[in-house]
Amino acid sequence: MKRKRFKTLLSTVLLGTMLITAGACGEKFEISGDDLTKGIKAESSDTIDTYNEEDNREAFNFSMDLFKSNLLCDNTLISPISVFSALGMTANGARENTLAQMEEVFGLSREKINKLLELYKRNLPDEDKLKVNMANSIWFKEDESFNVNENFLQTNANYYDAAIYEAPFDDTTLKSINDWVSDETDGMIENILEEIPDDVVMYLINALSFVAEWDSIYNENDIVEGAFAADDGTTQTADMMYSEENKYIEDGEAKGFIKNYAGGKYAFVAMLPPEDLHLSAYVSGLSSDKLRLMIKNAKDESVNVMMPKFTTEYEVEMSDILVMMGMEDAFDKDKADLRDLGTAGGNLYISRVIHKTKIDVDEKGTKAGAATMVEIREESAQIDGGNTVYLDRPFLYLIVDTESYLPLFIGTTLYVE
């Protein structure tokens, strides 16, 4: 008698939001399911207390490689740390060649990824004008046919402080997940899920919130209406914000600046190539190491800055991109080895990696958000003098942690909206 095969689906969801000011506490909500957090507490694990320069370099390289692979003839925005975290959690369930390929793409071992992200989370600031929070949760289905690996859960509890829920995966679970996401993202993401398909067995969710003001907020006299030369040759009208910054960057081709958020632990970085060099050509040829060192070793020089208020929304399915980068087996229904995650009636493999982002930049600060979903299925006014950087044409930008230089967001603005 042939064994009846059934299709299951595992999805990993990572969310990121960035806010200008701290939002009010979300309303309390009820979780539909069994809270296993008390039973699986984070244990003392092998962690690090300082960043390793080489590990930070590799993480930055992965971030830029991922961004370049996503680069389009349109506004582009990704959150590398979101993708890194989502895939890092998933990698804790991988074995053999599947794991080896993931580590090769990351440039770091699974153990180093876990330690790097644990340290990052542990050192997040919690201040009035700068607050960064990361929350993780794992939801798995009450189903006799799916057995989750407890070591997998424990590892993610140890390094990601993940809350763990076993739930029926019905409409009540759908509401619980959406409420949890909304609460952890200060209401920025209201409904990450529209429905839970019958074959879903797990969700891994990381919610990221960044609450910050500029170190020096623009006032009304700093903002004037100006022109932005869009990539398609049209001229747009934009609200231009003028300031004088004290960190200048140049690489022989492009020039840029660093503008701190409150407290200086996070910063907005912008690079402007010359008018005769297309932004995509500049970014494609830009060395990750060169960019990171430019940011790290920015010149202490005055720079007159003009930047537009802008908003970007971006969505991409990253499966083909990650396969192209070398993560092949994890997406192959026959070759994928995710047995350390759990067991089901058929082989588990990644089917999709969905990434959504949004960013708003204005006179007060930055408001942005990101969401990454990994699906795993079972087979079946002008200032005179000094350096000048006027972002009045397409430019590259990053939001970075100024200690580790891990980028939360990397984007290009070809037109303003």
Image (cartoon, helix red, strand yellow):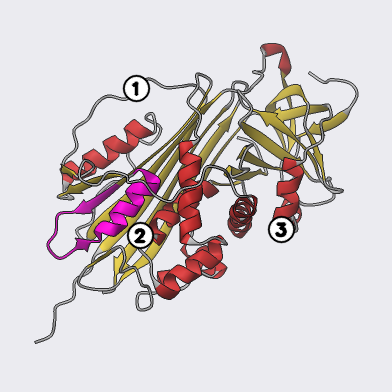
Report the disc number at residue 25. Answer: 1
Q: Identify the element where label 2 is drawn.
A: strand
- The residue at 22%/44% (across/down) is 174
Measured Cα–Cα span from mark 2 to mark 3: 29 Å
Q: Identify the element where label 3 is drawn.
A: helix
Front: mark 3 or 1: 1
Which residue, given by chain and number where applicable, does mark 3 sit on?
A: 284
* Residue type at the position of mark 2: Glu
Q: Looking at the image, tell me whether mark 2 or mark 3 is earlier in sequence order.
A: 3
How far across and how far down the image is residue 241, in percent?
71, 23
Q: Is 219 drawn above or below residue 292 in the view shown?
A: above
* Residue type at the position of mark 3: Ser
Please state which of residues 390 and 215 is positioned toward the viewer in this rendering: 215
* Magenta region, residue range: 138-161
Q: Looking at the image, tell me whether mark 1 or mark 2 is earlier in sequence order.
A: 1
How far across and how far down the image is residue 214, in percent?
62, 23
* Residue type at the position of mark 1: Cys
Label 2: few (<14), some (14–19) or many (≥20) C-alpha neighbours in 10 Å: many
Please state which of residues 274 and 61 is positioned toward the viewer in this rendering: 61
Measured Cα–Cα span from mark 3 to mark 1: 42 Å
